[in-house]
Image (spheres, coloured by chain):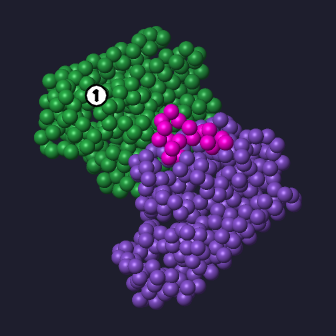
Chain colours: A green, B purple
């Protein structure tokens, strides 16, 4: 991981100073480095002893960071991980362009690896991520959206990169397709679980204790599972409320409090977490393909960690 | 070219309908298709008889279109090619994301080709383009910017993709490095000439006759050669004028008229066109590496076409 961090810092350099400045704000400032950790662990789980996984882990983190930068522009977010977001400090223009730069650097990193299968997996994932984000934009503010559409969004915007991150671990280790698919399934289900928890956290007091804002999704009128469940379980009066705040975006300060109250009443956060648990279990089952080892236990631990964030 | 157009339309499809809708607005609506034409012509000039150049030409057009979409967001443009820009119709958010999608599709197209040298050239070009655009953002509104910085901007944002577009023509044809470098030089110098003419056109009456707006760069405070020359050739009073309108962006309706007057007085449009002519000549000289042929004449004609736009 420290070799990967070093590579990330090396590859975000540019003669144009604004690029490393802005990239450092996001990348060097941290985050969990969850996705590169997945690539590194998956490769080791497959018995890989070389160093190609380091470049691919950095590539995965660059794709992720590029999408974060563009997400914050799209969502008009002021905060990211409890700090001022890059677009709030450097402006939307710089965030769009530096996101593009990180995308391009990600592609250079996969080209440096050069294996056709790796290139195919990671470049397809990049396209799928964006399709998920566009669909999210399309269904935003529409309470008539379906759970199937929501799942399609999170499978695209989140799970596709998790799946690619773990799958390439099997590819660099030259393991049979069955193991590549097991790791793909692990990553994909973990990604869905991760996003479900993220969406639950946005309406959870735990988030507030961590110094993060609650209700960002609410204010944007983002359609997530907690909202879809609360809408489905509410009577006509409640449905009108959700339409007013999410579709017409007429929100007073008291509306978020009321939304949280409705969610508690209908048990939607518990239900969202239960679904995350289900996908987490599917991720764990995918690992049955591999014998017990420290690396398998690490990947199992990541599932537990992702779900435990809500407690 | 018709095979390339078909591929462009095929590859902009997605189950998420907003993507082809928005992409069609820019891609299908046209533009000159100058960059894919360069790839097709360069490959044929090198005697290439296969079909790989079609996918690479589409890839080049996708990279170009992705950067156009993001440019319009960054520049807050209302118009593109005389029509409402995609961001004006679909919103900035959709433009950012569909730009990302086209970027990802471009990478999938180069991965489908798979040749390591092609991947290296095109992925490096993508990074260089963005570096040029970030530098443009950095020097924007700064009349103390130098001609060297301006050249660095246009070499990045425009010439790098022209150079890559032509260079890959030699690579698919498996021609020696000397010919790849000649085509790189052709594309790079053509790209510089093209951008110089574009920047001259932004202050030119010809632009107005074509139904396009004059003064977009002026309103944005963009630092282009006409402005740098007018600033350098003006006395203190004129320098104050340029600082007020470009740096502080205090502009009245009469200011653009005054700017155009100063430019005429100092002959800066003629000077910009003369420099474009110089780079155009360098592009033509690079073609000396190849014997006369219909394809060489086509590439020569493109140089003339690009420069003639100003008349």
Residue position for label 1: A228
Is residue A62 visible in the rendered image? The answer is no
**Left or right: residue A233 compared with residue B214:** left
Residue at coordinates 78% horizontally, 54% vertically from top-left? Answer: B178
Residue A258 horizontal side relative to residue B213, left or right: left
Q: Image quarter for residue B188?
A: bottom right
Q: Nearer the viewer, residue B286 or A282?
A: A282
Quadrant where the C terminus of chain B lies?
bottom right
Q: Main secondary structure of the magenta part?
A: helix
Q: Residue furthest front?
A: A236
B28 or B236, nearer to the observer:
B28
What is the quadrant of residue A90 in the picture?
Answer: bottom left
Q: Position of residue B291 (x, y in %)?
A: 87, 59
- Viewer-side residue, A261 vs B110: A261
Q: Position of residue B14 (x, y in %)?
A: 53, 35
Q: Chain of mark 1?
A: A
**What residue sits 50% from the left and 77% below the top?**
B227
Relative to A275, residue A231 above or below:
below
Residue A215 seen in render:
yes
Q: With B259 as the anchor, is B38 left or right in this view?
A: right
Q: Is residue B17 left or right of residue B272?
A: left
Indicate yes or no whether the magenta region holds residue B7. Answer: yes
Q: Specify the segment rendered in magenta.
A: B6-23
Q: Give yes or no for residue B46 being in the magenta stretch.
A: no
Q: Where residue B170 sits in the image (x, y, percent)?
A: 76, 49
Q: Position of residue A248 (x, y in %)?
A: 25, 43
Q: Dot 1 lies on which element? A: helix
**Would you place residue A150 above or below residue B284 in this image?**
above
Q: What residue is shown at x 42% (from left), y 60% (from top)?
A: B76
């Amino acid at each position: 991981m420290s070799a990967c961090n070093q590579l990330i810092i090396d590859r975000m350099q540019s003669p144009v100073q604004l690029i490393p400045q802005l990239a450092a704000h996001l990348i060097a400032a941290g985050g969990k480095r969850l996705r590169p950790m997945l690539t590194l662990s998956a490769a080791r789980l497959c018995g890989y002893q070389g160093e190609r996984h380091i470049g691919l882990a950095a590539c995965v983190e660059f794709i992720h960071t590029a999408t974060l930068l563009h997400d914050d522009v799209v969502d008009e977010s002021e905060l990211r991980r409890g700090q001022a977001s890059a677009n709030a400090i450097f402006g939307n223009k710089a965030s769009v362009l530096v996101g593009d730069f990180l995308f391009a650097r990600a592609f250079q990193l996969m080209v440096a690896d050069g294996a056709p299968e790796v290139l195919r997996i990671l470049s397809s994932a990049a396209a799928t991520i964006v399709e998920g984000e566009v669909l999210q934009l399309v269904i935003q503010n529409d309470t008539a959206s379906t759970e199937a559409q929501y799942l399609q969004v999170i499978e695209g915007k989140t799970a596709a990169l998790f799946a690619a991150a773990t799958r390439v671990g099997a590819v660099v280790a030259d393991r049979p397709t069955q193991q590549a698919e097991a790791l793909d399934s692990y990553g994909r289900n973990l990604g869905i679980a991760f996003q479900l928890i993220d969406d639950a956290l946005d309406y959870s007091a735990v988030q507030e204790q961590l110094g993060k804002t609650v209700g960002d999704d609410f204010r944007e009128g983002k359609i997530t599972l907690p909202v879809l469940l609360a809408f489905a379980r509410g009577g006509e009066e409640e449905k009108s409320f959700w339409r007013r705040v999410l579709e017409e975006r007429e929100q007073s300060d008291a509306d978020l409090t009321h939304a949280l109250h409705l969610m508690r009443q209908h048990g939607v956060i518990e239900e969202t977490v239960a679904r995350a648990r289900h996908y987490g279990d599917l991720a764990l089952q995918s690992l049955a393909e591999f014998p017990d080892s420290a690396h398998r236990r690490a990947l199992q631990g990541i599932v537990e960690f992702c779900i435990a964030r809500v407690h």
